[in-house]
Image (tube, grey):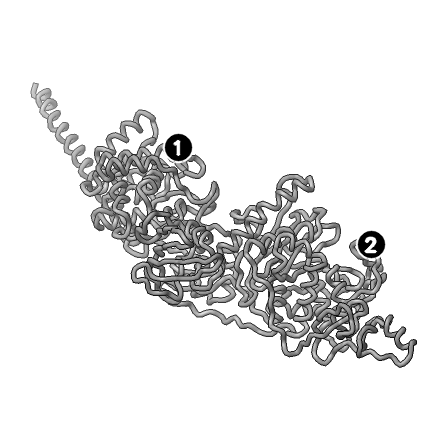
Amino acid sequence: MASRRSRGASRPSLRRRLLWIALSVSLLALCVGGLLLTAYLVRLDGEIRTRFAGARWALPAQVYAAPLELYPGARMDADGLIHELQRLGYRALTTLEGPGTFVQRQGGRVDVHARGFDFWDGEQPALPMIVQFTGKTLSGLSSAETGAPMSLARLDPMLIGSIYPQQGEDRVLVRLQDVPTLLPDGLMAVEDRGFYRHSGISLKGILRASIANFKAGRVVQGGSTVTQQLVKNFFLDHRQTWTRKINEAFMALLLEAHYEKDEILEAYLNEVNLGQDGGRSVNGFGLGAKFYFNKPLAELMPHEIALLVGLVKGPSFYNPRRNPERALERRNLVLRVFAEDGLIDEPTYVAAVAQPLDIAGGRDGGVERYPAFVDLVKRQLRLQYEEDDLTREGLRIFTTLNPRDQEVLEGQIVSRLPEIERNRKMEDGVLEAAGVVTNVEGGEVLALVGGRRVRYPGFNRALDARRSVGSLIKPFVYLTALSRPERFNLYSWLADEPVEVKMAHGPIWRPQNYDKKLHGPQPLYAALAHSYNLPTVNLGLQVGEAEVMKTLKAAGYPGDATPLPSLFLGAIDIAPVDVAQMYATLAAGGFQAPLSAIREVLDDEGQPLKRYPLKVRQALPEGPVYLLNWALEQVMLFGTGRAAYNQVSGAVTLAGKSGTTDDFRDAWFAGFGGDRVAVIWVGRDDNKSVGLSGSSGALPIWAGVMRGMDVQPRDPLQPASVENLLIDPVSGLRADEGCASPVSVPFLSGHPPAEWAPCARAAVPATPLDWFMNLFQRPGLD
């Protein structure tokens, strides 16, 4: 009996011990869990402080086109100015309403409120002005506020690209106080109504999302606050997992504990992803405004702000370029929220939903409009600036790109290639092209196209396609000869007769003329104008391959080809940009400025970076170049370039040369007017024949470019070493008033033709035999 009582009495004691053990284990687990959670939160807190408190973004370098300069006397008309304003995203109104607006008035007048901009040489404030045009000339420029005349004003330059972005991201930073109030207010109305009340997470939103996720068996809905979205974009990946959502919630609470609401909202405005531009993400509303509407965020209208806010939910799903109907529906839904919350009134809402999407650019439009040109900028930066300087963040790069010239060059290539393919019954898209445009003096690259897909940042044919240049090389053979005035001048007679050259370790080279015919002795300038091969080879053999190569090097050829006789007919591979350098040297009268796409680079404090100096130098002899350019003008008048005057007014003097390679694989044309040099290449990437000569394939594009740019006529200053003499075109000898139709031809001073033409009064033959010999004498046929 006593034993049973003893056993019964022990049972409560055992239960108490078990309960005590369970409580102890629970308390221990709670303490350990608390310690682990505390350590975890401390780690998260440190990560947030480190990354968020410091430099939050690695700012890319911003690349700008050359600004349009307005000044009395500038060659421009009212339509041209309006086109440029529209390209920059200015709005056409009936009265000026602040920066970024303009008014077209009667009588060739345009009122413009130019945006303020910090240029490389100082800041230009926002400026209302009156621009007056008379025909194709800017005749007056004055302040719209005071009426005072102005000597110069600039429009803000176009942002054409960004380079060195971190992890493929790009952004234009904005400050909260500088953005339109409708943006943050509308963003909170759509994305997070309780932003200024919660502490980082919304329990109501979490409950709603949890129910949806439980029903689906996976994470399908967010319920995230703006703070959580910022955490997700700034710190976390985009995988929809429970672990990531828990991290997101904790980090949002910690972020709110350390930073003010306005700091968080400003960071969100600069961080949120709004789309994709090729391989780079478009981050923040500042860049979003440029990417979609081509204007600053401060100038966006309600319907434009609503579209950007709508994109936050899904920039790919609501992409306005690829899914315009879906984007329009989303935008109008956001506008309805704006109206219901009293952020816009009903008339504004009605007007906004009636607006089109107003997206700038086409399906593939974006910030980096000119990838081939920006590619050149990237390469030249490392050649012209110190490497340490280029690693700085927030650089601003001002380039030489002329948007008007670029538009013309692109338009000609994009429109002409399909036309050529149709006319020649080629497969669509088989032809490729590249083009480079520079100014005549200064070596500035004004436009550059690397292929027919002008927005595609792929293989840059303008820089990297080294193709055989054919007859483009001939002017440098002739220049080599003209640099020896004791032997050659423009009317020296060249033999058009067969040539056989024994090549080292190879067969005998027997070049032929393009038409397989012989044309008899030719004046030097005419042989070049008609691009005859045999006279060129005969001339090249007289001056020597090595000497011609020296001339090419001096002009700007950067390669190391072996100087063989085939060099005289262009059996040498050169990239279009290098051809442009060589012809720019000719256009500048022998003076050479290395081609550059960069005007100035400023650091993040607005100070210019020190650059390696680019010097203009006399690369080729001025007098012989003047003579050669006269011959290149004859190419355009009656030679292989004469078809250009079907497009360009005959009153505009041009100089140029076509180039065609063996089996018609490459078609070239290079030439210049008074202010522009242009080079065009047309061919196939697989190097197969295109069946086009330089005159039929490249010249039409080149002439269209020159016409579209309104190129100025050539009017070079004649060097002191050159004199003009009358020449009898029949005999090539000196003429005077006794000859019926003499022509004025430039010669190097001290080296006139030795003989007088039979028609010249100065020619007084001693005997009839002398007269007969003078008639048929052809200097240079030794």
Q: What residue is rendered at 26% in x and 39% in y?
A: 225
To which quarter of the image does residue 328 belong?
top left
Side of 761 relative to 618 (left or right)? right
Q: Secondary structure at mark 2?
A: loop
Q: Residue furthest top?
A: 1
To which residue does mark 1 refer? 326
Label 2 vs label 1, nearer the camera: 2
Report, in whole angstroms, how far the alpha carbon at label 2 lies from the one at label 1: 63 Å
Q: Residue at x 41, y 58 (%)?
A: 132
Disc nearer the start of the sequence (2/1): 1
**Observer-nearest of 557 and 296:** 296
Where is residue 730 drawn, in percent x and y? 80, 67
| Disc 2 target residue | 516
Of the pair 743 and 430, the residue shown nearer to us: 743
The amino acid type of the residue labelled 1 equals Arg
On-image quarter of the C terminus: bottom right
Q: On screen, 325 above or below 629?
A: above
Judge left or right: residue 497 versus residue 137: right
User: Image quadrant for the N terminus?
Assistant: top left
In the image, residue 130 lies at what x, y percent?
36, 58
Residue 270 seen by the camera: no
Numbered marks: total: 2
Specify whether residue 503 is in view.
yes
Disc 1 crowd, CA 10 A, few/some/many (<14, 14-19, 20+):
few
Q: Amino acid at mark 2?
A: Lys
Relative to 556, is 45 above or below?
A: above
Left or right position of 291 against 48: right
Q: Position of residue 570 (x, y in %)?
A: 72, 60
